Image: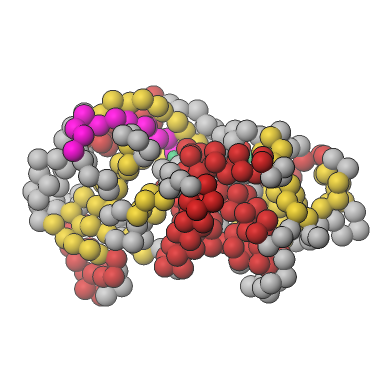
Amino acid sequence: MKNYLIIGQGIAGSSLAYHLLKAGARVVIVDHHHHESSSVVSTGILNPLSGKRFALTPGYDQYFAAATEFYADAAKLFSETFFEPMPVVRLLRSKSEGDKLQRKIETGEISDYIFKQYSPGHFQSLLCDDQGAVEIRHGGVCHTSRLMEVLKQYFIRKGCLVNERFYYDEIGFSADGAIYQGEEFDKVIFCEGYKAQFNPWFQHLNFKSIKGEVLRVRMGRRDISRRVLLRGTWLAPSTGDLWAAGGSAATDELDGLPTAAGHDTIMDGLKNIIHTDAEVLHHQAAVRPFLNHQNPIVELHPRFPQMAIFNGLGSKGFLVAPWLAKHFAANLTGEQQPAADRQYV
Ligand SMILES: Cc1cc2nc3c(=O)[nH]c(=O)nc-3n(C[C@H](O)[C@H](O)[C@H](O)COP(=O)(O)OP(=O)(O)OC[C@H]3O[C@@H](n4cnc5c(N)ncnc54)[C@H](O)[C@@H]3O)c2cc1C
């Protein structure tokens, strides 16, 4: 039986471990108690059209289908819902943004994802929609922190999760495997999130990670329907009666420490989304792992084929990881051929 050592139990490591276990492989995951885990802090929004230009994520439909399948499998396995399909309402910031959207819709490129357009003032008593709004479909929210915790308990019950810190000098090599704590593995797969920038074997990769902060808030008004609201800052339903608000981004201090500046940026942004007060209950920060080319990587080490990396999920980890993990696992177990030399997916 093939066996794999996975470093990191974020959405990358978890979805890969899930698919490998399903294929009958042996898996050992090492995770340092979700320390500075981006997946735990993440808002888990899935949205086909991002940014000022309403850019359609390439391959969105295949990613969305695999993600919803993975979250539905988890719901069945754990008798709990983790993914809620819901509308994404983008509040327009200016007339020129509205014109840009209109032109894009007319090309046909994004029309399948547009449910409805709203004139300025449609939601006026609740939302800041002075420039109008657009409702985007095929989106939703994954309750990431709960999913990560439930998966952690599942891997512990299966006897395949070790909650400890991994040190690079603890890895040794055999002829065609890797040795960790006296056990030989066919491969060690690094899913360490932004910490991969310190991995001595993957220094050839150019990480450009970005820190983000999230406030868990209780909204003053309770009659807000469950949908994602975007206007630079975002506001998304979380678990229970909480909402997650986020939007700050920093590239200097890459760590998991919440900042006063991050708090203020998000609170100011909220005032441009919704006409109600928000009580902050929790403030978190984490780092989104980005590579300079902005694409995820799933590849073998150039010299040591016993090592691979699954990383660079950026701001769309909960959209792309399940599809990438499914195909990566199929490549590893020999069910599918890798896309190219060294490149698994
Ligand atoms: C504020 C914020 C908001 C976000 N919002 C969204 C969103 O709305 N939608 C979306 O799809 N994505 C979002 N993201 C991005 C998403 O969270 C990431 O793409 C994804 O979580 C990355 O997953 P990962 O498994 O690669 O890394 P991580 O989740 O960071 O997991 C890495 C794991 O490796 C472990 N680890 C690292 N080094 C070691 C070591 N030496 N020993 C043991 N364990 C180790 C850590 O403990 C951690 O658990 C957001 C991110 C942030 C920060």
Quadrant in which residue 302 is drawn? bottom right
Quadrant in which residue 16 is drawn? bottom right
Could you tell whether 318 is left or right of 47 in the image?
right
Across and down, in percent, residue 194 comes to 59, 43
Magenta stretch containing residue 201, yes or no? no
Q: Report whether residue 58 is seen.
A: no
Across and down, in percent, residue 152 comes to 60, 40
Across and down, in percent, residue 153 comes to 60, 39
Q: Quadrant of the C terminus?
A: bottom right
Q: Tell me the residue at 23%/69% (across/down).
A: 105
Colour convention: secondary structure
Q: Main secondary structure of the magenta part?
A: strand
Q: Tell me the residue at 66%/67% (across/down).
A: 330
Could you tell whether 113 is left or right of 160 in the image?
left
Could you tell whether 318 is left or right of 304 in the image?
left
Q: Report whether residue 108 is seen.
A: yes
Magenta stretch containing residue 209, yes or no? yes
Quadrant in which residue 85 is drawn? bottom left
How many numbered circles are shown?
A: 0
Q: Tell me the residue at 47%/33% (across/down).
A: 285
User: In this picture, is 12 found above or below 332?
Assistant: above
Quadrant holding ligand 1?
A: top right
Q: Tell me the residue at 21%/29% (across/down).
A: 220
Numbered range of the magenta stretch: 208-223
Given residues 234 and 19, the one toward you in this image is: 19
Given residues 233 and 277, the one toward you in this image is: 277
